[in-house]
Amino acid sequence: MADFGMQMPGGKMQRGPVPDVYAALMALACVALVAACVVVYQGAARVGPDGNAIGVQDQNNIKLPGR
Amino acid sequence: MHILTKVFVLFAAVLSLLLAALTIPFAYNANAINEAFLDERDAKDAALGQLQAQSTAFDAELSRVQGEIATIQNDLAQREAEINDLRSENTRLLTDKRNAENARDAIAGQVDQFGETIKTQTELVANYRSEITSLRDAELRFRREKLQLEDRVNDLESNNEVLTQTQRALQEQLAEAREAMDSGFSSRSGTGATSSDPFVYSGPAIVGRVREVERDDATGQLLARVDLGQNDQIRENMKLFITRGDEQFLANLVVVETDLEWSVGRIDTLGTDNSIRPGDIVRSTLQ
């Protein structure tokens, strides 16, 4: 019950803030973003010029990395 | 707010920016690649269509070329067959030529041989001619000598005949004188005997042939005419002998009439049935 911030009679005194559900959600979001970045990086590296993930292809001169 | 939550928020913001930075060129590049892919596919379709057309034209050209190749191959096969025929014909002609040359050589050899033979025969004919000429000369010389000898023999025979006749006349005169002395009759002159008994000529053998045989109707006697006469010292009442061949005795012939070339005599078969034919031999003696 102390985890939910409730003061029970006879319990210890609360010393500081503790991670809540939002911290967990943000951690999960961070993990998801990292995974998305990895996947998107791999896809961008495949379609980028000469394997450059952030490069832009010339419309008349498409250059793709080899397999 | 917990510090950890804040850190996560910060990480999330940074990761969001990074994700956005990666997503934008990714989407752009994907779009560009997609358009390029579509363009290439259209180009590929066009190329395929062109390729199909070219393939159709190529097939037609290939068919035409194959037809021409087949025609050329047929012509080539015909040419090869003609070449084979010509080769076989050439081989046959060469064989015939070789045979003809062999025959020519053989004929030439025969001609040479015949030439040598003719030369040899010419020499033989020349030798024969000279030999015949010498033989003819020798024969002429022999005949000439023979004629001379025959003339001499005839002369000697004439002398012999004269001497023989003289001797015979003397013998007859002697015999007549003896008969006259024995019978008391005076001797007669001449050469014919008139006594009724036939006599045998004692001179050289006289040989003739029977020419005709016939029977005397008046007396019934068988008479024969021979080719011996007075020229052959045949006299009347002379006894001759008729034979057939050299050994078979047939009959006696007593001369009853004489002429210069012939005589007629009476045939006496001595009781045998021998028949006298013209051609039988008449002899003065059987020895």
Image (spheres, rainbow, N blue to C red):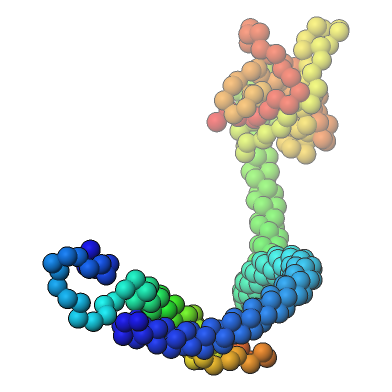
Task: Return the x and y of residue B65 as percentages of the image width and height.
Answer: 76, 71
Q: Is residue B78 left or right of residue B163?
A: right
Which quadrant of the view contains residue B64? bottom right
Quarter of the view holding residue B254 = top right
Q: Is residue A16 left or right of residue B285?
A: left
Horizontally, residue B103 falls left or right of residue A31, namely right
Q: Residue at x 68, y 59 (%)?
A: B150
Q: Between B209 and B157, which is closer to the camera in this rendering?
A: B209
- Whether residue A4 is visible here, answered yes or no, is yes
- Whole-percent x, y for residue B101 in the image: 65, 74
Between residues B165 and B157, which one lies in front from this camera angle?
B157
Apparent side of residue A33 relative to residue B148 in the rendered image (left or right) = left
Q: Which residue does the image show at 82% across and 15% down from the upper left?
A: B214
- Determine the residue positioned at 75% across, 17% down: B266
Residue B250 vertical placement versus B38 (above, below): above
Residue B140: horizontal and vertical position, in percent?
70, 68
Q: Residue A12: x percent and y percent?
A: 14, 73
Residue at x-position 34% and y-position 86%: B7
- Residue B148 in view in this figure: no
The residue positioned farthest toward the front in the image shown: A9
Frontmost residue, B131 versus A38: A38
Q: Please, is residue B13 above or below residue B181 in the view?
A: below
What is the total number of numbered labels drawn onto the structure image?
A: 0
Quarter of the image that includes the N terminus of chain B = bottom left
Question: Quadrant of the rendered structure where residue B230 is?
Answer: top right
User: Which sits in the foreground, B145 or B135?
Assistant: B135
Q: Quadrant of the C terminus of chain B?
A: top right
